[in-house]
Amino acid sequence: MPREAIAMTRDELLAFLAVQRWAALATLDPDGTPVGDLVPIRLDGDELRFAVPRGARSHANIEHDPRIACAADEFPAYYEIRGVVAHGRATVRAASPLGPDWIEYGVPLDDTSSFDFRKIQRKY
Amino acid sequence: MKIPDDVAEFLGRHTRAFLLTRRRDGAPTIHPMTGFFADERMTMSTYRKSAKARNVERDPRAGCLVVNGYGKDDVRAVGLRGRGSLRQAELAAMPAAGRAAPKVSDSVAGRVAERMTSGKRILLDVEPDEAAFVQRLWSE
C-alpha cells in the first residue's frame, strides 16, 4: 500500500515555521556523534534563522562542521501532529537580534521533510 | 554511565523526544518521537524499515533531546549522546507505564501493539555516554 501523502505544501511549511519560536537543533560533535540543543528560531523570507550563544557547544560544532538539522513540531492531538525538519549548511548572518552574546545562522529551506497528520484519512 | 539524579528525574517525567541520527551522507537529522527513559537509556518505537532505524543500523552514533512537553513557555531539555541500537520486542517491553505521554486512541495503540508482535515495529534504544541539561529557553 503506498504511504499516504502527509507532507506539507511549501506554503503550509512556511506558515507553520512562521509561528514557531524555538526548535531542536542537531549538530555534529568532533567525533561525529549528533548532539541536540534548543534554539530560538525565526523565518526570514525563505530562510530559517536560528541563534546559538557564542562559545556554546553548538557554536563550536557548527564552526567545525556546518551541517545541521532543525526540527519544530506540535502535538495537540494524534491526528493534529505537525512538524518540519530542515537540513542544510548553517551560514553566519549579520548581527543577531538577540544581542552580541548570540550568533545567528541561516539555513535555506530547500532540503526539508514535513508531516501533517491532519492529512491522514481517518480510516481506523 | 551514571546519569545525574536531576537529569534522570527529568528524563523519567518527560516523553517528548527528538531522536538525532545521521543520514547516509553523514549529515545530522532529527526525528520527533515519543520516548521513554528506563534502565539508563531512552527507548522509542518505530518501523523496522523506517529511515531512523536504517540510519541507526548503518551508523549507531545517535542522540536524543528530551523536552518538557508541548505548549510550554518555559522550555527545558536534556541532551543525550551515545549509541543507538534496535531490538525486537513485544509492546509490553516499552517502559511506558505510568508516564505522562501524549494521548493516542485505543485503535492507534492497538495497531502499534499488533505491529510490534508481527515484527514490523521494533524498539530503538539510545544508550548515553553523556546526558546533561542544555541551555534553558524562555520562549517569551
Image (spheres, coloured by chain):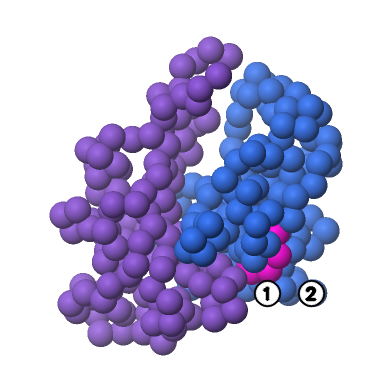
Chain colours: A purple, B blue
Residue at 41 percent of width and 27 percent of height: A5
Indicate which disc residue A42 carries.
Answer: none
Q: Is residue A74 above or below residue A87?
A: above
From the image, which quarter does the N terminus of chain A lie in?
top right
Q: Is residue B21 left or right of residue A27?
A: right
Residue holding disc 1: B130
Contact (Cβ within 8 Å) of mark 2 with mark 1:
yes
Residue at 34 percent of width and 52 percent of height: A111
Q: Does the magenta stretch mainly form a helix, a strand or a loop?
A: strand
- Does residue B32 show up magenta in the picture? no
Residue B27 at what x, y percent from top left?
47, 63
Identify the image quadrant of residue B89.
Answer: top right
Q: Is residue A117 left or right of residue B50?
A: left
**Gap in angstroms between the C-alphas marked 2 and 1:** 7 Å
Residue holding disc 2: B1
Identify the image quadrant of residue B4.
Answer: bottom right
Residue type at mark 2: give it. Met
Q: Are marks 2 and 1 on the same chain?
A: yes
- Where does the magenta region start and end? B80-84
From the image, which quarter does the C terminus of chain A lie in?
top right
Closest to the observer: B124 or B40? B124
| SS type, badge 2 | loop
Earlier along the polypeptide chain: callout 2 or callout 1? 2
How many neighbours does mark 2 have within 10 angstroms: few (below 14), some (14-19), or many (20 or more)? few
Q: Is residue B119 left or right of residue B22?
A: right
How many neighbours does mark 1 have within 10 angstroms: few (below 14), some (14-19), or many (20 or more)? some
